[in-house]
Amino acid sequence: MIAATSAEVTQIPERILLTIGTVVFVIAMFALMRKGWLRKISSQSEIMQPLGVPADFVADVSFTGRYLASTQAGSWLSRIAVHGLGVPARCIIESSHAGLVLKRDSADAFFIPRRDLISIRADRAIAGKAFEKDGIAVLTWKLGDTFIDSGFRADTTQQHIDFLSLDVLQESAK
């Protein structure tokens, strides 16, 4: 019986150089992505910080799901990088007569007053995320002088329907 042996390893210096080159390339790509994100943050520095949650806020109804990101209104690929608004996270949205509170995992919760809410609509995509037709609830709201679209995808179909049926425009007129 002949013993099975592996082939002799050849071209060791070339393999080491290729491995080092690949690692350097990957590190350079991550560094360039970070540089682009930081440049985007500095270019959006005029966007004000969202309001914190009022101490007297009491929710009438809440919805669980995923906060997808925020973009400049009307431009679903123009993600907002400042104040953590462009970072996706698990989320609970609470609604009351005063407005909406978005409580995100691993990010600060923020408050959108009713007077700043413009609409809630169903859409298909936001911030590079695309789903089935009307699979995303998009909040359009005003933050200072900036109009923002924030994407939310509820955990269940019924929550999605209920969230879309919030009558934001009627409530803000009161």
Image: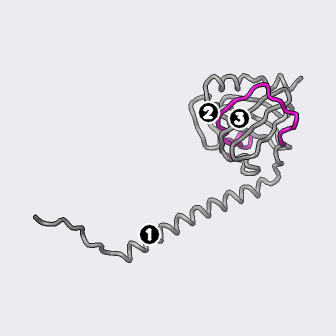
Residue receiving disc 3: 92
Amino acid under label 1? Thr
Classed neighbour count for the residue bearing mark 1: other residues with Cα under 10 Å, few (<14), some (14–19), many (≥20): few
**Going from the N terminus, do you reach mark 2 or mark 1 first?**
1
SS at circle 2: loop
Q: Which residue is mark 2?
A: 124
Q: Is residue 75 magenta?
A: yes
Relative placement, left or right, of 15 versus 39 is: left
Colour option used: one colour
Q: Mark 1 = which residue?
A: 19
Image spot of residue 99 (x, y percent): 82, 31
Give, as a single range, the part of the protein colored magenta.
52-79
- Could you say where residue 104 lies in the image, as x and y percent from the top left? 71, 41
Quarter placement of the C terminus: top right
Q: Disc 3 vs disc 2: Cβ atoms closer than 8 Å?
A: no
Q: Secondary structure at mark 3?
A: strand
Question: Which mark is first along the chain, 3 or 1?
Answer: 1
Residue type indicated by callout 3 = Ile
